[in-house]
Image (cartoon, grey):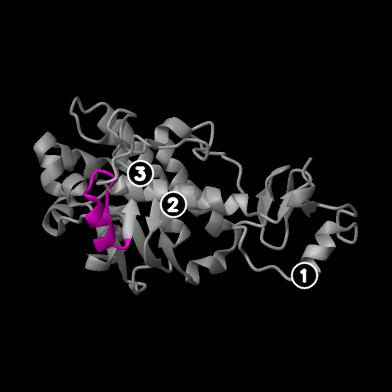
Amino acid sequence: MYSDDRHDKSYIPSVKPYLWMRYLQEDPSRENETYFYLDSDVLLREIPNVKPTKNKWIASACESYLSVDYIDSKDKSLLEKMCSVIGLDTKFIRENNPIGGAQWAIKHPTLEYWKKVYHDSITLYKLLDKSNTDIQKWTAEMWAQLWNVYHFDKKVETLKEMIFSWPTDPVEKYAETKIFHNAGVVDDHQNLFFKGKYVNHTPFSDSFEHVNQDKASYEYVKAIREVRDMAKSAKYLSNENWRDLDDDKEYEKDKPWPRPVNKKVSQERIDELLSSKNKASRPMIRKAEEQG
């Protein structure tokens, strides 16, 4: 967990490259790893079989809202302004027409790269906000991330394995793709799951009877119900708010432990947390049936 010390918080998605910066600053050896990088509103029906290299990263195709043609459709001069303001070659971006985004498989990301993405995302957002166009300015961070891959002499490949479905797609599309991205539903009046309704509370008590079962959105509802039902099968509950140092997770009072509830934990560890024979010197969990 990191504190949010961004110098400019006007653009919320800039927190993503910012957190990458903090993560790599904390331990530089993490630059030598391979990562699957995605948003929190994603379901993986199956893990994509992709192998990025140090010089070639892999992403989902987002041509409809990241391509040069999309930018040109809003303002022919906008691409040049976007590239200029973050120090990139317009001709190079136009010739390569990169379209990768949303979900990424990356290898050996550097602090230098994410630092530039962080600053560029804010700069691009402010430019687009003043552009007097209806371009999706909220995706400034996606352009900053995508274009800077090329700036740091890497390539981006978009593969079939990374194709994803949207909530508005027919439910059959969900089964045809390995990734589901729960984005694009802008209100609660489309007979689809609207995540914006749950900023301050969880969705587990809602029935979702209104959600169209012919749309991919319904698969997200099924996943919510699965998690809810799994939580009901919890064998242990937390006695207080605490952090389990074994899995580095925060747990809330009266909420299930561990997460997920079907996680395999040794009986020795369970007995330790049920008793006072742990670092806190007090029972941290109790059996679920003991909850008043």
Q: Is residue 73 above or below residue 26?
A: above
N-terminal-most mark, 3 or 1: 3
Give me the residue at 14% from left, 43% from top.
Answer: 70
The local crowd at label 2, few if under 14, some if 14 to 19, many if 20 or more residues have their Cα within 10 Å, is few
Query: In this view of the protein, can residue 75 be seen by the observer?
Result: no
- Indicate the position of residue 194 as horizontal and vertical percent values: 37, 35
Extent of the magenta region: 165-178
* Residue in the foreground of this view, choosing between 228 and 289: 289
Front: mark 3 or 1: 1
Q: Please name the residue that numbered disc 2 is placed on.
A: 223
Give me the residue at 28% from left, 35% from top.
Answer: 137
- Indicate the position of residue 278 as horizontal and vertical percent values: 86, 60
Q: Are marks 3 and 1 in contact (CB under 8 Å)?
A: no
Q: Please name the residue that numbered disc 3 is placed on.
A: 120
User: What amino acid is at disc 3?
Assistant: Asp
User: What amino acid is at disc 2?
Assistant: Ala
User: What amino acid is at disc 1?
Assistant: Gln
Query: In this view of the protein, can residue 203 be seen by the observer?
Result: yes
Front: mark 2 or 3: 2
- Indicate the position of residue 123 as horizontal and vertical percent values: 34, 37
